[in-house]
Image (tube, rainbow, N blue to C red):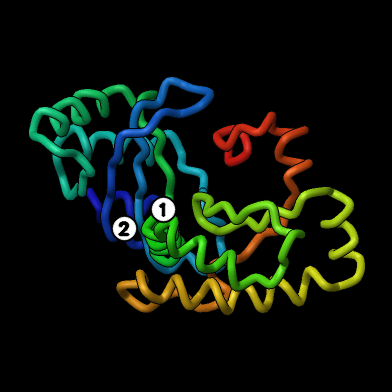
């Protein structure tokens, strides 16, 4: 299966991982990461053809070379049944480095995030630091504060410094040592934007 899919994608398939997941705007019940290498600078979510998606779903249904985040044989049996309906499987092609970034960021604890926030030097300017799906976001209070920092160039200095500090956190979880300081970016946003444009709702913000 990996060989057939590799030929279709033009990249070597390392493994397929499945985990329970709920798509916010669709019927998908499971997220499927097809982890590949030698994709160069292409983005994380690469489009799959219907044929490629069907090959992946067949591999899951037939239990061929799949790593599954399931706690029981019953859960795995449910995933295999679901894979016979590709609409229930949200399939994402992802390169190894990006997969590692997602995994590493997910392992960062609230205490580590709090220590990182304490090192930013923002004082009362800081609302909070939110560790997202693949990167941290530093929230100031207002859009005006963010705009002023961007216009003055201060935001660029902040990001450079903060990415070095965040890399110190990342290294503690980077099992293969593949992530450098620029592989996990630090974003800057405002509480005002979050509350006014996303109704203060994290799933909408990260959608």
Residue 72 visible in image: yes
Residue 117, percent from left and from top: 58, 64
> Dividing the picture into quarters, in which one does residue 191 lie?
top right
Single out the residue that lies furthest toward the left. 73
User: Mark 1 near mark 2, Cβ–Cβ under 8 Å?
Assistant: yes
Label of residue 25 in the image: none
Q: Is residue 170 left or right of residue 116?
A: left
Q: How far apart in space, not on screen, are marks 1 and 2 (Cα)? A: 9 Å
In the image, residue 5 above or below residue 87: below
Q: Is residue 26 left or right of residue 124?
A: left
Horizontal and vertical percent position of residue 172: 37, 74
Q: Residue at x 82, y 72 (%)?
A: 154
Location of residue 110 by image quarter: bottom left
Residue placed at 60% from the left, 56% from the top?
129
Of the pair 52 and 167, the residue shown nearer to us: 167
Dot 2 falls on a residue whose secondary structure is strand
Q: Along the line of sight, which residue is nearer the eye, 102 or 127?
A: 127
Quadrant placement of the C terminus: top right
Which residue occupies the foreground of this view, 17 or 180? Answer: 180
- Answer above or below: position of 166 versus 106: below
User: Label 2, on which residue?
Assistant: 13
Residue 135, given in percent of the width and then of the height, sits at: 55, 58
**Is residue 75 rendered to the left or right of residue 194?**
left
Tag on residue 9?
Answer: 1
Q: Residue at x 35, y 69 (%)?
A: 173
- Residue 10 in view here: no
């Amino acid at each position: 299966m990996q060989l057939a899919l590799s030929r279709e994608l033009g990249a070597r398939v390392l493994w397929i991982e499945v985990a329970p997941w709920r798509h916010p705007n669709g019927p998908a019940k499971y997220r499927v990461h097809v982890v590949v290498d030698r994709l160069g600078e292409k983005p994380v979510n690469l489009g799959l053809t219907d044929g490629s998606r069907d090959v992946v779903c067949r591999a899951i249904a037939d239990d061929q070379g799949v790593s599954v985040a399931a706690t029981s044989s019953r859960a795995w049996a449910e995933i295999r049944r679901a894979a016979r309906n590709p609409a229930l499987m949200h399939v994402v092609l992802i390169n190894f480095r990006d997969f590692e970034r997602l995994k590493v960021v997910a392992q960062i604890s609230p205490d580590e995030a709090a220590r990182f926030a304490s090192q930013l030097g923002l004082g009362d300017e800081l609302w909070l630091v939110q560790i997202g799906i693949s990167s941290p976001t530093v929230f100031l209070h207002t859009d005006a504060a963010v705009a002023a920092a961007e216009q003055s160039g201060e935001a660029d200095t902040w990001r450079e410094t903060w990415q070095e500090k965040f890399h110190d956190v990342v290294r503690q979880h980077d099992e293969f040592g593949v992530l450098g300081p620029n592989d996990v970016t630090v974003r800057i946003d405002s509480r005002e934007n979050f509350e006014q444009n996303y109704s203060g709702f994290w799933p909408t913000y990260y959608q």
